[in-house]
Image: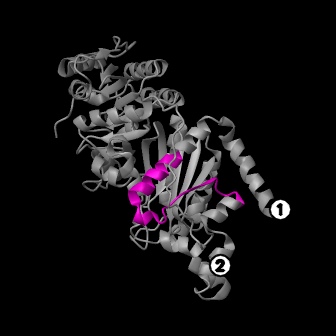
Amino acid sequence: MTRISAQQLISEILDADSFISWDKPPHYGNISEDYLAALAKAREKSGVDEAVVTGEGTVFGTRVAFVLSEFAFLGGSIGAATARRIIDAIHRATEEKLPLLISPSSGGTRMQEGTPAFALMVSITTAVYRHKDAHLPFLVYLRNPTTGGVMASWGSAGHFTFAEPNALLGFLGPRVVELTTGRPIPDGVQTGENLAAKGVIDGVISPQQLRSSMQKINNVLLSPPAIAEPTVHVPVSAALPLRAWDAITATRRHDRPGLQQLLTALGAEQVIALSGTGDGRTSPTIKVVLTRIGGRPVVIIGQDRHNQPPLAETEMGPAALRFARRGIALAHQLQIPLISIIDTTGAELSQAAEEAGMAGSIARTLGELVDVDVPTVSVILGQGCGGGALAMLPADKVLAAANGWLSPLPPEGASAIIYRDTTHAPQMMQDQGVSAQALLESGIIDDIIPEAPDAADEPMEFIQRVIEHITHALWELENNPKRVGREQRFRHYERLADALIAD
């Protein structure tokens, strides 16, 4: 396939006449005559003086720094001069507080420079993490081909990672793999399309779509936040369910709005979806998105009940919670609030889930939510069943829909344990205090989002109310920083234990 040059990419993604080069003449030190000749030939062939082009430009008026590989220059290979140019550009982007686009197209280390050049992948990665420490957006756009040490270091370190269509991407190129192992890589494995489907990268987009994606990321993350206190509307007909079982029955309605309706209401123009864990796992039962709520950038990690049994086949297993933890890490890296949406029939119960560490995955997710250093809000949108719900509960502020509920086990399972039948489930749920009102009285949640009287009968109005309550919760946390953070959460949940014992 044809390869997109660095100059072509600049023309596709940057505003007209906005390109400013940061490149300085490369220095190579004492090198062989053969290497000098190879460099001269590469300059003539590619029209550039090294295997990367760096600089800045604007995308819809917003300044962006970039590092773009040029494959026509010695296969985009990385030597000492190349690494120095990349590092300098990343440091400048960090100093000037600019979002960063890196677009590799490289076979990896420059063979003329050997192991010292190979070790420079670490040096480039340290510069990347300095940029990340500044909580600035970092987007990777993988071009054909990207393999070797580049793919295995800074090419896989983005907050968001996309690839051009039909790009060859992999740890090592197919020819190297076959010659080294004696076994060929099957066709279609080392493609962006396959890696996106497996949750390794976030999607496959054209250069034109890359420009739009960069605009969306910049708009979500860099637009000024709202300041004024938001309004919360309470419907006149709002009512709490009379019994816990009424709430449970309401949340089991197939037409009850859930995570998908919430994301739709936020608007496609400001929702950036991740595709998986980044390390080869994905699950439709959880979605992780970057978006704006109430004029503030947030990360949402949300359980999608409509992609879980009994409405779908996939259960929420360890991979799903690993995906959620990627969202927690992203909120930490960008230092923006984290919203957790709880709506699940429960975690996966199977041999595969046990052997993949279901319990440990719940524990790690719960622990990371307690520990994360950004404002957090969790919402029990509907069903909150078992450890799968508990994993995503801890937050600075916890909300629940009027018909939302939280239970250690599926109601029928709890009844089966005690009574060896399911007919006692309604009374057991009442006695166990699973309803939103009972959760509020026990201090497990902080506020109730009204339903009028059932979200399924007023889906759009209910979802708007959810957004209003999340917006107000974020405003409260922003204006009361003592309510935010791990120490506050530690104290809150320790006091919760004391309060429940006192009762």
Asked if 219 appears above or below 372 in the picture, the reply is above
Q: CA distance from mark 2 to mark 1?
A: 22 Å
Region rendered in magenta: 442-470
Q: Give the position of the N terminus as an image quadrant.
A: top left
At x 47% / y 66%, what residue is drawn?
454
Mark 2 or 1, nearer chain start: 2
Horizontal side of 9 relative to 24 (left or right) equals left
Residue type marked 1: Ala
Mark 2, Cα crowd under 10 Å, few <14 / some 14-19 / many 20+, is: some
Asked if 385 appears above or below 158 in the picture, the reply is below
Asked if 477 appears above or below 439 in the picture, the reply is above
| Quarter location, residue 440 | bottom right
Residue type marked 2: Met
Q: Looking at the picture, how far across and down is residue 191, in whole percent? A: 28, 48
At x 32% / y 29%, what residue is drawn?
77
Query: As rendered, which of 225 and 391 lies closer to the eye?
Result: 225
Q: Looking at the picture, how far across and down is residue 22, in whole percent? A: 35, 14
Find numbered disc 2 in the image and state the secondary structure of the residue it sits on: helix
Mark 1, Cα crowd under 10 Å, few <14 / some 14-19 / many 20+, is: few
* Residue 335 visible here: yes
Q: Which residue is mark 1?
A: 502
Q: Looking at the picture, how far across and down is residue 318, in whole percent? A: 51, 61
Q: Is residue 462 in the magenta section?
A: yes
Query: As rendered, which of 286 and 358 lies closer to the eye?
Result: 286
| Quarter location, residue 257 | bottom left
Which label belongs to residue 428?
A: 2
Colour scheme of the picture: one colour
* Residue most extreme to the front: 236
Q: Looking at the picture, how far across and down is residue 68, in whole percent? A: 31, 27
* Residue most extreme to the right: 502
